[in-house]
Image (cartoon, grey):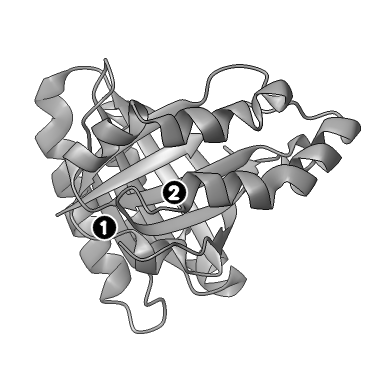
């Protein structure tokens, strides 16, 4: 099991703000990750597709963290380190960030390191559908990782900090061909239909870079 955080910063996206964000980003990242508050892996990038719509021009950031333990996450939220990091970029924020924490079956490292990364989240209509969603992901993970032509990496799990139950999966595709073909295969489409039957499904595609971390 792993503790995986999806962080969606709310940042201003006018041209001047985007330029300022890129200039201050190295300072902000260092404040956030040095000293290391408990990150095992970290990735930062942008949402490029949202439910079939190209959103590249919107400059919507996403960060993925893998935590060493839950206590580290909660302690960091209350820390002066986080407060100082946020203060350095607060003038460029349009609102509070969205933090979504998941207990995943595996580390998100391999999936998030892939050339094409897809994140599928299902907001469940009721908690009785959690097991159905997780079993669907277990089957889909076996289908994708066991396919010699695809060799996709998958990490999935249930939310642990949200008011409503959400099950999310991160799929790391090895290339655009694997993604376009694999996402049209019967095994994938059947899993998508199964998820849609128990809740509202959201699909985003993201481009990520690895964040350098200080040693724990």
Hey, which residue is sitting farthest bottom in the picture?
148
- Is any atom of residue 205 visible in this view? no
> Local crowd at mark 1 within 10 Å, few (<14), some, or many (≥20)?
many
Q: Secondary structure at mark 2?
A: strand
Q: Secondary structure at mark 1?
A: helix
In terms of depth relative to the viewer, which is nearer, 187 or 120?
120
- Looking at the image, residue 109 sits to the left or right of residue 17; the answer is left
Residue 110 point in image, percent of width and height: 37, 69
Please report the residue visible at 32 percent of the width from the left and 41 percent of the height from the top: 168
Q: Are marks 2 and 1 in contact (CB under 8 Å)?
A: no
In terms of depth relative to the viewer, which is nearer, 174 or 34?
34
Image disc number at residue 98: none
Residue 160 point in image, percent of width and height: 21, 30
Please report the residue visible at 28 percent of the width from the left and 38 percent of the height from the top: 73
Residue 22 point in image, percent of width and height: 76, 47
> Local crowd at mark 2 within 10 Å, few (<14), some, or many (≥20)?
many
Labels 2 and 1: the sequence-earlier one: 2
- Looking at the image, residue 11 sits to the left or right of residue 62; the answer is right
Residue 151 position (above or below residue 116) = below
Quadrant including the N terminus: bottom left
Please report the residue visible at 38 percent of the width from the left and 70 percent of the height from the top: 152
Residue at image mark 1:
140
The quarter holding residue 162 reads top left
- Looking at the image, residue 126 sits to the left or right of residue 16; the answer is left
Q: Nearer the viewer, mark 2 or mark 1?
A: 2
Hey, which residue is sitting farthest right in the picture?
16
Residue at image mark 2:
64
């Amino acid at each position: 099991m792993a503790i995986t955080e999806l962080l969606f910063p709310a940042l201003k996206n006018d041209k001047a703000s985007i330029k300022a964000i890129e200039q201050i980003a190295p300072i902000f990242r260092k404040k956030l990750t040095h000293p290391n508050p408990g990150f095992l892996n970290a990735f930062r990038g942008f949402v490029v597709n949202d439910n079939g719509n190209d959103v590249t021009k919107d400059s919507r950031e996403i960060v993925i963290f893998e935590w060493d333990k839950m206590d580290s996450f909660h302690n960091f939220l209350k820390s002066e380190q986080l407060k100082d990091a946020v203060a350095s970029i607060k003038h460029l924020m349009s609102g509070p960030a969205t933090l979504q924490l998941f207990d995943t079956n595996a580390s998100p490292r391999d999936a998030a390191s892939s050339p094409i990364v897809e994140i599928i989240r299902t907001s469940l209509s009721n908690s009785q559908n959690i097991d159905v969603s997780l079993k669907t992901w277990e089957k889909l993970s076996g289908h994708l990782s066991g396919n010699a032509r695809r060799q996709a990496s998958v990490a999935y799990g249930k939310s642990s900090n949200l008011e409503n139950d959400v099950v999310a999966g991160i799929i790391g595709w090895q290339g655009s061909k694997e993604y376009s073909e694999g996402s049209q295969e019967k095994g994938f489409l059947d899993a998508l239909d199964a998820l849609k039957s128990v809740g509202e499904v959201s699909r985003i595609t993201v481009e990520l870079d690895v964040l350098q971390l200080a040693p724990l």
